[in-house]
């Protein structure tokens, strides 16, 4: 499984977050879409039936209305400044820099939230849960289906569940969400230890 794809998938999905169910869901999608700065803390959990194991990763996301983002996933981070994607690995002490644009796979996986209703068919299961089925001809990195659970009290998504390409169960549990008018520009400036190796493509 490509962990980066599913982390970035979450970045885009968490921009969906549910007045009573469908009306409340629409309101939360609108609030997230119109927010100048979205900050989310979450845990990604991968459960393997084959190896009878569970891996979890504490992560955070800061995303602004222009499309810039900073995703911290454990000791790794991914920074996009509208020109370059900086992928930092603390374990390898490396920063990989590659040109990126709105047509890139990762950018699309983040930005498709603005057209979420054309990306998925939504079936209401209960007051706080929805089953999402991907429409035809959508980004291949997006799972075919998702189970979306809402936190009605706090007006946000509480959990996403899906199967990855290996059939493993993936859960995204949202711990905290903040919406602000703007993000600090300094958030999207590359800032890494002096000792890292820079690799440019």
Image (tube, rainbow, N blue to C red):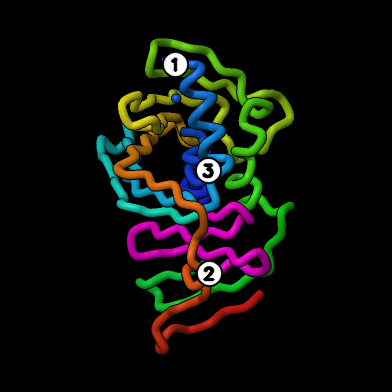
* Crowd tier of the residue under label 2, counting other residues whose Cα lies within 10 Å: few below 14, some 14–19, many 20 or above: few
Instruction: Please state, as top left, top right, bottom left or bottom right, where the C terminus lies in the image.
Output: bottom right
Question: Is 71 colored magenta in this rendering?
Answer: yes
In the picture provided, is 135 more to the left or to the right than 164? right
Secondary structure under badge 1? loop
In the picture provided, is 196 more to the left or to the right than 48? right
Q: Nearer the viewer, residue 160 or 22?
A: 22
Secondary structure under badge 2? helix
Ranked by sequence position, the earlier of labels 3 and 2 is 3
Residue beneath disc 3: 9
Q: Point out the stretch of residues depicted in magenta.
A: 64-86
Question: Is 181 colored magenta in this rendering?
Answer: no
Question: How far is disc 1 from disc 3 in space, using C-alphas?
Answer: 24 Å
Q: Position of residue 16 (x, y in %)?
A: 51, 34
Q: Is residue 123 above or below residue 187?
A: above
Q: Nearer the viewer, residue 175 or 6?
A: 175
């Amino acid at each position: 499984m490509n962990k980066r794809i599913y982390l970035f998938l979450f970045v885009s999905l968490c921009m969906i977050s549910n007045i009573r169910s469908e009306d409340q869901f629409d309101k939360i999608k609108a609030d997230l879409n119109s927010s100048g700065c979205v900050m989310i803390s979450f845990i990604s959990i991968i459960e393997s039936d084959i190896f009878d194991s569970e891996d979890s990763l504490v992560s955070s996301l800061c995303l602004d209305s222009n499309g810039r983002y900073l995703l911290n996933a454990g000791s790794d981070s991914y920074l996009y400044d509208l020109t370059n994607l900086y992928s930092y690995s603390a374990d390898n002490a490396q920063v990989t820099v590659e040109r990126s644009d709105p047509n890139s796979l990762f950018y699309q996986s983040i930005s498709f939230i603005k057209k979420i209703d054309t990306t998925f068919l939504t079936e209401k299961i209960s007051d706080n849960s929805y089953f999402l089925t991907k429409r035809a001809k959508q980004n291949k990195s997006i799972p075919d289906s998702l189970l979306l659970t809402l936190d009605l009290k706090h007006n946000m998504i509480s959990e996403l569940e899906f199967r990855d390409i290996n059939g493993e169960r993936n859960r995204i549990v949202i711990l905290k969400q903040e919406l602000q008018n703007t993000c600090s520009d300094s958030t999207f400036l590359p800032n890494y230890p002096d000792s890292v190796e820079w690799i440019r493509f």
